[in-house]
Image (tube, grey):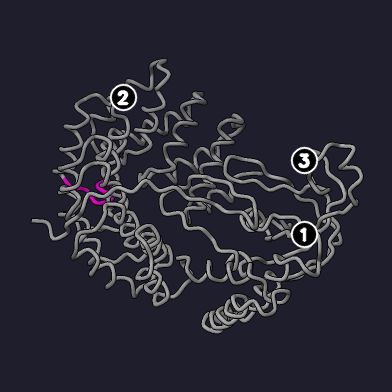
Amino acid sequence: MSIFRITKIIFATAFIHVAFLTSIFACSYADGYLSTTHYDHVKAASVILLAEPYSKSGNKVDFHIRQVLKGEFAAKEYTASEVNTSCTVIRFPLNRETNLPTFLAEKLPKEVPKYLLFLEKGKGEWRLSIGATEAMNSPIWDDESADSLIALRHMIRVSERNDYEVEKRELRELARRAKQGRQPQKYPKLLGKLIDDHLSTPTPDKTFKDLVEIFRKSESDTQRDVLWAFAWGGHKEAAEFFKNLIDSPIPLSYIGPLSQYITTTRHEALLVRLGRNYPDLDSSSRWPIMWALLKTADERHVGLMMAALRSANKEEAGRLAEWFVRFPNAEATEIVRLLVGGEYQENWELTFGLAGMGDSATISWAKEFMRTDDEERWIAFYTIAHSPLVEADILARGVIEGSDTDGITSLIQGYEESHNPNKYDRLLDIIRLPNKDPKVEHWLKRTLLTMSEDGDVRSSMLLSLVGN
């Protein structure tokens, strides 16, 4: 009997991104998304500017820098781009927008608004921080009395304390003064609202103690966000919290943050307790646990992994097979072989796993299929790329030494996620090819760069050998 009792409650989660002041844009985000508070945007920003637009061409807007509110920024001008997508809207109108008829609008005083620009350094140049700029994308007409600018100055000052507890105390005092309403020009109500939002919003940077307090005071959706904050923040103290949580029935929606917490912290005891339940859950609920198993389990957990594989459908087995490529198991190979059932092309994800496990029949099939003119012959080259067998490596050498550009390209692409120990030698062979086709050159650089960015040291060394 499973020790992990789960109540089948499924939440459909929608996230609303609220722009500063009046503009509201709805957009759905991936599971686990946590909104960033205005204060967190302020604290994270390298540079915050008060800027006045003076010309616009298409979506490009030129600004005069009127004041550097945070950080160091020497330039007197900056060019930013407006953004208009399904999830993000950033606009910089040069004049006050109105629905009045043109002849009446022309009689209004000509005022030029100012805007807050949040900048971050990227590739040697300053670029707009989209999330922060969108959150505070509202025209400022009066530098002295605009509530948004007054609130921002307070938040900048507090954020520069660089002491979590000190900042929290000062924010609470500012919120108290704003709620009193005795000095609205110095402590506007907006300031109190933004601080309350920050203190009650689950974010990974908050302390474990503060997140637990938010959890106990909140409704179910916010409680789930607290679990995601534990997961993304990797709070070690949360392990006991999660252990206590899963001793009672929990919603299925909690499996996602719990699985991510295991992945982030590599907490072995929680992995075992959660992983035992994989076979008992329906397919739609298994995926977060499966990713935690794949990223965290090692040779000590072969029992968990075998139980998961035995209960898996073909799609799940295609992912789980990757683990058994790294930790070979005869029974696992036979299970995958039976699931493929000789239909290598149709079950190509399983085929790659089976090849990685060292199945020779898979390579015999790939050897024949690669010589056809089938539009899916790329599957054969990927299969060869995944196999550690000598026969597969001989085939790979032949492809590299030949003139099949598409074959070489597919081989390169297949090596990206392969655990084949021969792949580095073969990629080096491709690097050394004279007069490479531009397509091969492109995919060689792209694949090695992706591998390098994922922390593959040997691919970084190979990338250094590739010409610009």
- What percent of the width, then of the height, locates residue 72? 76, 70
Q: Specify the segment rendered in magenta.
A: 323-329
- Sequence-wise, the earlier of marks 3 and 1 is 3
- Residue named by callout 3: 99
Q: CA distance from mark 1 to mark 2?
A: 60 Å
- What percent of the width, then of the height, locates residue 412? 47, 36
Q: Amino acid at mark 1?
A: Ile
Outermost residue to the top: 373
Callout 1 environment at 10 Å: few (<14), some (14 to 19), or many (20+)? many
* Residue 328 covered by magenta stretch: yes
Query: On the picture, is 404 further left or further right than 305?
Result: right
- Residue named by callout 1: 140
Q: Does residue 57 appear in the picture of this structure?
A: yes
Q: Quadrant of the N terminus?
A: bottom left
Helix, strand or loop under label 2: loop
Indicate which disc residue 345 carries: 2
- Sequence-wise, the earlier of marks 1 and 2 is 1
- In depth, the one of 208 and 221 nearer the eye is 221
Q: Amino acid at mark 3?
A: Asn
Query: On the picture, is 168 further left or further right than 90?
Result: left
Q: Residue at x 24, y 51 (%)?
A: 327
* Residue 225 covered by magenta stretch: no
- What percent of the width, then of the height, locates residue 183? 70, 79
Q: Residue at x 69, y 60 (%)?
A: 118
Helix, strand or loop under label 3: loop
Q: Amino acid at mark 2?
A: Gln
Q: Quadrant of the C terminus?
A: top right
* Quarter of the figure with residue 122: bottom right
Total number of numbered labels?
3
